[in-house]
Image (tube, rainbow, N blue to C red):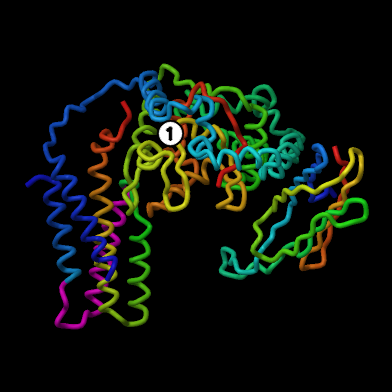
């Protein structure tokens, strides 16, 4: 499977997870896992020199919700952050070739 | 929840875009970098798009795009808002550092009438050196702490130096050095690369939409866009440098900005200045 | 200390055209600084231009006027070489004044 389709699937699944209503309340462990995934993706985006401000904001919101003990919200925000980070990676990767389409020649 | 639907929309859009360009074998392999051809095409793009604007007027940004704004700006130029900063810059420039030297000792021709040569490619260092960078290096070489790159003192100093070069055409050189060509090419790539959650590149506004509006602002053409720097911007209620503009634009499109004078920004300034070669320095400037 | 007021008055026929640029922070009192604290209000409250002992322009300002205000107006009358006096007073009681000759 080509690289972009893999990342597309990853993005789609991230969104599905984010959108799914959980039958059980999220635990702190769930939050920690979700946060780790978000931070890892955001770090990768940083390596590509393409982080989004909204990603950092979503991570901050997740941490704030966790501090208040609302792990459902913390997980939701972490998942959003991960999706945003992945989108920024997607953008950076594709723009490596797509930028030429905008160039004045 | 708004953000989620926004992400879905964004990812759907990105998906569509990538699918549209999914045939990957686009024949843009190792093109030779030809800055001379680039600059010619760049200039032609804008002069074709705005045939009634004189070449030297492109340096006035939005004021060259809109009649009414042009009239208001001409009036304002009789008593320009950057005057205070310019006076401060002039004073600072000749005032000695603690060690007795001054900025005059760091620059050719005592820093007078040289702004149009910046940025330049430093072959010893292998990197682009901008005017702002040179000023802070001058300070550090003389035992003084560096200034913030985005405002106040740095703006005042660059305002003064720009003023002494008013009317002189941009004269950026790319030496016959593959590293210089690479820096130029990196700057060009940065300019056209989309970034931030809003997925804009510099070109989105300044190549695709000059003269049009983004909210209430009229967009400037990319040709000559740095010639008026530094600027007193009403939006900022104060002066700002090229560094200020690059970093704030990044955050406005929801991309995390780099540190001022990071390589990408230096290369971007190099590219944008080079393709505006021949257009007169008009700084310091005023903008909405 | 240098004046905060820069003014130019030019006679054109029977009308004197005046432009002035005043250096003043004009803080409205609604803006917060980087630490999240309110920057206290600090703005010009009264600005006057006097010619021949009479007020030819008077402004009562509040925090809505931007930093480093620029004013332009014209008045009937005025003679070359005559004085035009400009003064302001702000909400902290600070003042400045300057006199310019009509050109």
Please provide the residue range marked out in magenta: A20-47
Position of residue B116 measured from the top left corner of the image (x, y, whole percent): 57, 26
Queried whether the magenta region covers residue B280, the answer comes back as no
Residue designated by label 1: B267
Residue at position x 69%, y 52% in the image: C68
Residue at position x 39%, y 20% from top? Answer: B40
Q: Residue B136 lies in what quarter of the image? A: top right
Residue B36 in the image, given as x and y percentages of width and height: 39, 18
- Which residue in the rendered view is the most extreme toward the top? B176
When asked about the image quadrant of residue B95, the answer is top right
Q: Is residue B124 visible?
A: no
**C97 over A57 or under it: above or below:** above
Toward the viewer: B156 or C69?
C69
Viewer-closest of C30 and B52: B52
Using the rendered image of the protein, determine whether residue C24 is visible from the camera's viewpoint: yes
Left or right? Give the position of B162 relative to A87: right
Name the magenta segment's main secondary structure: helix
Q: Please name the residue shown 67% across and 63% down the image.
A: C27
Q: Position of residue B49 (x, y in %)?
A: 39, 30
């Amino acid at each position: 499977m080509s690289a972009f389709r893999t990342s597309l699937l990853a993005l789609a699944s991230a969104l599905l997870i984010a959108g799914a209503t959980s039958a059980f309340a999220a635990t702190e462990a769930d939050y920690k896992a979700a946060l780790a995934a978000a931070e890892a993706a955001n770090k990768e985006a940083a390596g590509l020199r393409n982080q989004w401000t909204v990603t950092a904001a979503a991570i901050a919101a997740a941490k704030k919700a966790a501090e208040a003990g609302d792990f459902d919200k913390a997980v939701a925000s972490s998942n959003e952050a991960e999706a945003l980070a992945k989108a920024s990676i997607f953008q950076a990767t594709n723009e490596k070739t797509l930028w030429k389409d905008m160039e004045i020649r | 929840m708004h953000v989620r639907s926004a992400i879905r929309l964004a990812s759907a859009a990105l998906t569509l875009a990538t699918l549209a360009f999914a045939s990957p074998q686009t024949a843009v392999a190792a093109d030779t970098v030809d800055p001379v051809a680039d600059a010619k095409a760049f200039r032609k793009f804008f002069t074709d798009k705005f045939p009634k604007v004189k070449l030297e007027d492109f340096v006035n940004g939005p004021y060259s795009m809109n009649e009414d704004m042009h009239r208001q700006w001409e009036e304002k130029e009789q008593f320009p808002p950057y005057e205070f900063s310019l006076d401060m810059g002039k004073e600072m420039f000749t005032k000695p550092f603690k060690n007795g030297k001054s900025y005059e000792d760091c620059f050719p021709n005592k820093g007078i009438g040289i702004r149009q040569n910046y940025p330049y490619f430093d072959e010893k260092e292998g990197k682009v050196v901008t005017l702002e960078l040179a000023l802070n290096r001058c300070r550090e070489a003389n035992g003084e702490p560096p200034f913030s790159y985005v405002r106040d003192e740095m703006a005042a100093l660059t305002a003064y130096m720009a003023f002494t070069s008013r009317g002189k055409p941009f004269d950026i050189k790319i030496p016959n050095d593959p590293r210089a060509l690479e820096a130029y090419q990196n700057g060009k790539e940065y300019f056209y690369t989309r970034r931030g959650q809003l997925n804009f590149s510099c070109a989105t506004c300044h190549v695709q939409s000059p003269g049009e509006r983004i909210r209430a602002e009229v967009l400037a053409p990319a040709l000559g866009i740095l010639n008026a720097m530094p600027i007193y911007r009403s939006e900022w209620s104060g002066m700002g440098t090229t560094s200020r503009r690059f970093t704030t634009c990044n955050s406005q499109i929801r991309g995390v900005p780099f540190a001022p004078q990071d390589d990408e920004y230096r290369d971007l300034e190099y590219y944008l200045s080079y393709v505006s070669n021949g257009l007169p320095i008009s700084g310091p400037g005023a903008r909405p | 200390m240098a004046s905060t007021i820069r003014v130019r008055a030019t006679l054109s026929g029977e009308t004197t055209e005046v432009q002035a640029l005043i250096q003043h922070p004009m803080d409205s009192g609604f803006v917060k600084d980087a630490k999240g604290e309110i920057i206290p209000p600090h703005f010009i409250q009264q600005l006057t231009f006097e010619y021949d002992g009479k007020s030819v322009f008077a402004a009562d300002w509040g925090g809505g006027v931007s930093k480093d205000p620029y004013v332009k107006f014209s008045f009937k009358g005025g003679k070359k070489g005559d004085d035009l006096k400009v003064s302001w007073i702000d909400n902290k009681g600070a003042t400045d004044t300057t006199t310019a000759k009509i050109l």
